[in-house]
Amino acid sequence: MSFLQTLIAFIVALGVLIVVHELGHYWVARWCGVKVLRFSVGMGRVVWSRRFGPDKTEWAISALPFGGYVKMLDAREQDVGNLPPEDLEREFTRQNVWKRIAIVAAGPIANFLLAIAVFAGLYSNGIPEPTPRLRAVPEQSVAYQSGLRGGELITAINGEEVPSWSDLRWKLMQLAVDGVPARIDVTKANPAAQGQLIDTVRLPLDSLQASDLEGDFLGKLGLDLARPPAELGKVVEGGPAERAGLKAGDRILAVDGRPMLDGLAFVTLVRGSPGKRLELSVRRGEDTLALAVTPEATTSGKQEIGRIKVEVALAPEMTTVRSSLPTAIAKGARKTWDTSVLSLQMIGKMIVGDISWKNITGPITIADYAGQTARIGLISYLSFIAFISISLGVMNLLPIPVLDGGLLLYYSLEVLTGRAIPERVGEIAQRAGVGILMTLMAVAVFNDIMRLMS
């Protein structure tokens, strides 16, 4: 069932992105007066088609699901010698260069517009997100040296509001890529006045390497999401926790004399202690008890872990990020722009070797993410589609022959020189472009396989 769900989620996401991209080309081609002969979802041999519309355009599904195309009336591909004058006027190469630029650019632009629409819908509907409250900050970390201790609620970074943990991570990643320090506004408890204290700290990000952005870069700074205290929920009958005398509502204060930071710290300790006796300090109502529990060993994958069979609250404090429709559209456009810029910056760092080429992902990883986000919920799945749509738009704008960006490069040169590039040059560039794409695809599939094996 999990594989089937992943497959369906991947097909739906891929289908939506391809259709939107090609509809961008189709609509602008029609608007510019160019005759469209075929609209295909998929590449290769046509397996199903129907003709309708004023030009009897063939709407088709082709055998290879990766991609699609809009086939226009084009003298480079069809014999147009016997066409009537009214059809010749609608041939692609006879259009002025600005119309050709508009038609080619419309596909990536449609992907960006889809992302804006999805983000705007999510923001206006409301997105449940963890609040940007900090867990206890490790000593010797950059965050600790900057004055952060844990428990602070981050409200803004460099003057921009940060309503959720994902916004916090996104903003710090952007600043880290740009090499700009973060000015963080926080609200924290003020024991002296029994109220709240507003403070600003400066968090330098120059300790991060470009390769750190590939993983948990927040952890390298000493930042982590706050979790609830180690309070027990349902205790499974006959399990190690019940045999030890633990009850629902107990709060774990310390284990083997070491204070428990929160529920996540307790769960991590138990999982790492199969068969080991643990001495607990437990708060029950007004009393503090000393109890001992031995986690039973169990196998999870290839690893042996400990379990005491009790629920522990781990869900962080949540907030719902909601905006009015105009604000949501503006935020969606900003998110799309920022994601596009960051994607280009990361590609640039890969080219110069600052970031590993292992970050290039292929269809297997994308399908896996599609399945994971679909299982989490509709909001996560729609966000995934928006981000992939942006990636598709950015990738298609790269100046690689056979991609939209390569064609836009040709037409830009035509605007500058007043002449189309020679046909022989175009043919050589096309072959080079195919080679580049095949190499990138090989690297992506190799990375996918290595991720599966590891």
Image: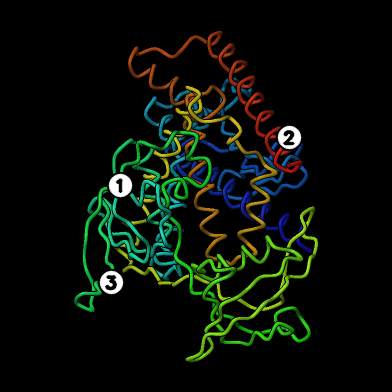
Q: Within 10 Å of the Cα at label 2, are there few (<14), some (14-19), or many (20+) other Cα atoms?
A: some
> Of helix, strand and loop, which one carries label 2?
strand
**The residue under label 1 is which amino acid type?**
Leu
**The residue under label 2 is which amino acid type?**
Gly
Q: Within 10 Å of the Cα at label 3, are there few (<14), some (14-19), or many (20+) other Cα atoms?
A: some
Do the residues under discs 2 and 3 have CB atoms within 8 angstroms? no
**The residue under label 3 is which amino acid type?**
Ala
Q: Mark 1 points at which residue?
A: 203
Do the residues under discs 1 and 3 have CB atoms within 8 angstroms? no
The residue positioned 38% from the left and 51% from the top of the image is 335
- Image depth: mark 1 or mark 2 in front: 1
Please tell me whether residue 99 is drawn above or below residue 328 in the rendered image: above
Q: Mark 2 points at which residue?
A: 44
Residue 253 x/y as whole percent: 51, 75
Residue 379 x/y as whole percent: 52, 65
Q: Mark on residue 171?
A: none
